[in-house]
Amino acid sequence: MTEDARLRELICTLAKSMFDRGLTGGSTGNISARTLDGGLLVSPTGTSFGCLDPGRLSHFDAQGLLIDGDKPTKEMPLHSAFYDTRSSAGAVVHLHSCHSVALSMMPDVDADNFLPPFTPYGIMKLGQVKLLPFFMPGDPAMGDAVRGLAGKRSAVMLANHGPVVAGKDIEAACNAIEELEDTARLAMMTRGLSPRALSQIQVQAIVSKFGVEWDR
């Protein structure tokens, strides 16, 4: 199996895994990954994570031209913004995961640090997650908002919409966005119960030990 074919299969396998576990439903969500030659493989518009076809993924060359496959997701500006501002980005995933969307609607969340520090893994895999305001689906302004962060965040939360995460490769991006949803679920489960979060000293120790990007 060629590297291109392996990557296509992996994108579809991971997408189906997330769909099967209810992390995004229907035809929601989109996913992309860098190819070895600097191009991109992207989930097509209107497709379900539950049944992506490896042979029909949108395929862009290194200059950003669609060279084969179906029409790409309308959220391409989001993906492009991460790739253009983060040289380490090898993949980008966007979900409509319920608990993170629910948390984005709460009036008291910190827009600069969306996730509460409940476990070390959310900190290690995501750093600080920026909560962005609501945009209409497909609005290029979402990409502009990500560009405005100048590559300082690997993850953002689109209010009333869903999370977007960039990772070094497709597996890292998927693992990180699942950690985001898990932490949001913990936040919603414990809301109003005064949960004991990690202290600032503990957070800083994790940031230092694991070299986490931690920029406001």
Image (spheres, rainbow, N blue to C red):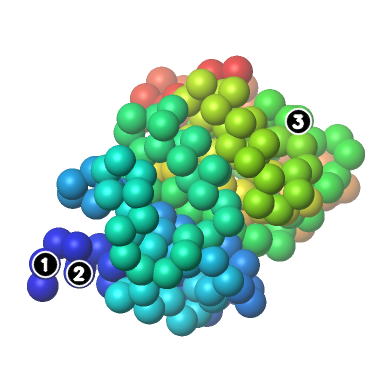
Q: Amino acid at mark 1?
A: Thr
The numbered dot on residue 2 is 1
Q: Quadrant of residue 216?
A: top right
Q: Secondary structure at mark 2?
A: helix
Q: Which of pointers 3 and 2 indicates the residue nearer the eye?
A: 2
Q: Which of pointers 3 and 1 indicates the residue nearer the eye?
A: 1
Q: Amino acid at mark 3?
A: Asp
Q: Amino acid at mark 2?
A: Ala
Q: Are marks 2 and 1 in contact (CB under 8 Å)?
A: yes
Give the camera-side residue of 67 and 193. 67
Q: Secondary structure at mark 1?
A: loop
The numbered dot on residue 5 is 2
Q: Quadrant of the N terminus?
A: bottom left
The answer to whether 131 is drawn above or below residue 33 in the figure is above
Residue depicted at x 25% and y 63%: 7
How far is mark 3 from mark 2, CA to CA? 41 Å
Q: Position of residue 111 (x, y in %)?
A: 74, 30
How many marks the image carries: the answer is 3
Residue depicted at x 18% and y 47%: 37
Give the camera-side residue of 74 and 177. 74
Q: Are marks 3 and 2 in contact (CB under 8 Å)?
A: no
Q: Position of residue 15 (x, y in %)?
A: 44, 69
Farthest-out residue, left: 1
Q: Quadrant of residue 113?
A: top right
Q: Quadrant of residue 125?
A: top left
The numbered dot on residue 110 is 3
Residue 168 seen anywhere in this rendered image of the structure? no
